Amino acid sequence: MSNLLAYIHAVETASSASALREAVIQLAQQKDTAAIPTLIAVLGYNNPAAAQAAVEGLIALGDAVVEPLLAQLDGYNYGARAYGVRVLGSIGHPAALRVLLAAAQSDFAPSVRRAATKALGTLRWQLIPEETAREAQLREALTVLQRNSEAADWAVRYAVGVALDHLYQQAAARALREAVCSLLKHLGDRDPDIVVRSRCQLALQRDYLSMHI
Amino acid sequence: MTAVSEPVQLTVPQMLAQLQGTDPGLRYYAAWWLGKFGLETATAAERQAIVNALIGALADEADRTELGGYPLRRNAARALGRLGDRQAVPALIECLHCEDFYVREAAAIALGQLGDPRAIAPLQALLEGGVAMARPVPGRPHLVQPVEAVMESLGHLGATEAIPLIEPFLTHEMPRVQLATARALFQLTGAAEYGDRLLAALESEDVQLRRTALLDLGAMGYLPAAEAILQAGVEASFKLIALHGILSKQLHQAAPAEQTLSLFQGLDQLL
């Protein structure tokens, strides 16, 4: 622990952007849950390289990060919130579902909306064991994805495609498979942006490949 | 409430009247509004009236800054570029001689947007004198001529005859001008040496320059830059836009799937 305090101190007293990044990498390498508050704080330092290192460190620590991160996500600057939402999406614990649904729908920052939108697909839905509850929550997520599939920002619509691709591949989301498939087809045919269209087509083709190999 | 909302309550006739009124602030705003929202709601007759009024505003004498600038003319030129009506071309060409640098710059950009080859020779004239001419104006944050905007528009216009005039600007002392030159030359020639110059700028110490180069490479759809764009020290939102540009071009050219798959993976990770 005293050793960890030295690593935390190095992060808190780093005097340059590159020293900060280096200190964050060192702290993250300790893989110690006691580093979580410091790593979360780094997300708000407005230093992209250090924040990226903190994101990776937090993701590596897994589920233990979810509760403290959810508790500190409010009142954050939007840059930090976008990093935080990316961490939540990568860890994929459904405890983050409420926060992610709200962020995907109404966060004012596009970077947060698209990260949260993608996260709705990468949640580990199998962690909601009770099928009726899981299906109800999946439907809520799908409703938000449907709404965001009409967003003006192509990147939010692209994030919808990515989320749908993940849902399509998850056995735990099988109950929604037809609805997911039809939204992917719709976007693959009709989205005004060629990149969004092609991403959705790719999701459907992958399925085609896995069925025929 | 401090929320910013779309000015939905404003109408084209209102804004047209405001543009032709006497209050300089309101006229300036109306020119911007008509360029931004005018086409959405205008009837064909209104559209013609908008273009006429904006062309008229290009010759405005009433709205002057202390330094002699013409703010209304600047906004009118920008609006005409957005509206895409080639009736504005002769008046915009006139503006290339305006004493206000920012009017010349706005007109140069608008002429590139309108895509009319009549603009090529007058735009080229602004590059006459080459690098020696394109010095900073003492006490102002700009050069003698808006050479970056001019080169960009000549690139959009496909003006290959301008290549000999443009090429020397690769040696201009300002890195920003060098980048604009490389981008225009890439557009006009497709030669990798120019794309690679922008690629090298992704390593620049100056974050503003890195962002500019990154967005340029994306707009050019320069595939060899994809990996470097992902690794560049620039915010993810810039990388998304740039990678989207490259991927769009690949998809429009029906590139093979194995070439685009890694680009999709890159975009997925940037979300």
Image: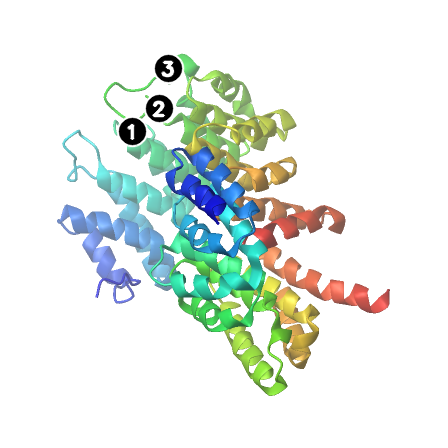
Nearer the N terminus, badge 3 or badge 1? 1
Pick the residue in front: A34 or A104. Answer: A34
Q: Is residue A40 left or right of residue B259?
A: left
Q: Nearer the viewer, residue B85 or A83?
A: A83
User: Residue at horizontal 64%, vertical 28%?
Assistant: B192
Of A7 and B58, nearer the camera is A7
Q: Which badge, 3 or 2, is on the more N-terminal residue? A: 3
Give the spatial CA distance, label 1 vs label 2.
7 Å
The chain that hosts pointer 3 is B
Q: Which mark is residue B101?
A: 1
- Does residue B95 lie above or below B172 as drawn? below
Q: Residue drawn 53% across and 48% down?
A: B240
Q: Residues within 10 Å of mark 1 (few under 14, many from 20)?
A: many
Q: Amino acid at mark 1?
A: Phe
Give how far apart the Cα atoms at labels 3 and 1 are: 14 Å
In the depicted structure, whether residue A117 falls above or below residue A60: below
Q: Quadrant of residue B57?
A: top left
Image x and y of residue A163, in percent: 59, 65
| Residue that badge 3 annotates | B133
Image coords of residue A195 (percent x, y)? 61, 55
Query: Is disc 2 surrounded by few (<14), some (14 to 19) or many (20+) residues within 10 Å?
Result: many
The location of residue A107, given as percent across then percent down, is 40, 64
Residue at the spot of label 2? B145
Q: Provide the chain ID for the residue under circle 1.
A: B
User: Where B50 falls versus A139 (above or below)?
Assistant: above
Find numbered disc 1 in the image and state the secondary structure of the residue it sits on: helix
Q: Chain of mark 2?
A: B
Tag 1 near tag 2, CB within 8 Å: yes
Is residue A118 something that shows in the picture? Answer: no
Q: Which sits earlier in the primary sequence, circle 1 or circle 2?
A: 1
Left or right for A166, reference A39: right
